[in-house]
Image (tube, rainbow, N blue to C red):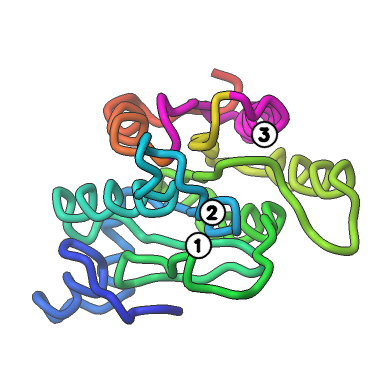
Amino acid sequence: MSTAIIAKGSIAAKMALTAQSFQDILMDLTAVVMVDTSGSMGARDVSAEGTISRFGQAISHLQVLQEENPGKFLIFSFDNEVRMHLGGVPDDPDRSYDLRMTRMDLAVKALFDFDGTGVRLFLLTDGEPSASGMTSDEHQSITLKMAAKFETPIDVIHMGAQSDVLGITFCRKLAQASGGRFQKTTRPGELMAPIKAALALPAPKRGA
């Protein structure tokens, strides 16, 4: 769990301001957001100048969303493992020398802890799953089978390149497997519009 940076409106910030416990805040939670922090999220293709990474763009938007909705978003990140960030700001993949994979299976498994609790579930990624020790097909199959067991749909937002056909196809399958919505961002790292649009709609229901 990382709380090194505390964003305004994050759960850690609300706990400090109100003296509410983590459990109390969870009772009033709106959404759990699982953010991809694999190596590809460090790609600097957001702007023509190449100064902003996909991760940097995504986190700046998440910080605004948390500030506008204090204590309503619980943030997780995933790469080789899953981490909870009460401070609302995951670690930048640019600052790691490790090979960060995209363990989508672990991300979906962690989201299952919030299945059926009444909160919205979001998974934000820029591509398809990757892991050592299993093929892409095996990883996808495991992840999709887990997603199919969810009572609460997962809204999946692909925030990578428009040319990433394989990643977009998998993300669409993942959303469909859980009964959730798939959204493709207009540019890498763009999150504000798709999350706000999703929250403005009724929570999707299986079979609807």
> How many numbered discs, if any?
3
Whether residue 181 appears in magenta in the rendering, the answer is yes
Question: Which is nearer the N-term, disc 2 or disc 3?
Answer: 2
Identify residue type, mark 3: Gly
- Please report the residue visible at 45 percent of the width from the left and 36 percent of the height from the top: 188
Residue linked to disc 1? 77
Q: Is residue 155 visible?
A: no
Q: Nearer the viewer, mark 3 or mark 1?
A: 3
Q: Tags 1 and 2 in contact by the CB under 8 Å rule?
A: yes
Which element is circle 1 on? strand
Residue annotated with mark 3: 167
On residue 142, which mark appears? none
State the residue at coordinates (51%, 64%).
93
The one nearer the camera, 139 or 162, is: 162
On residue 36, which mark appears?
Answer: 2
Separation of residues labelled 1 and 2 (CA atoms): 6 Å
- What's under tag 2, amino acid-wise? Asp
At a point 89% along the width and 47% down the height, the residue shown is: 138
Position of 198 relative to 150 (above/below): above
Nearest the viewer among 186 and 120 is: 186
Image quarter in which the N terminus is found: bottom left
Within 10 Å of disc 3 (Cα), the crowding (few <14, some 14-19, many 20+) is: many
Q: Any magenta on residue 187?
A: yes
Q: Which residues are magenta?
A: 163-188
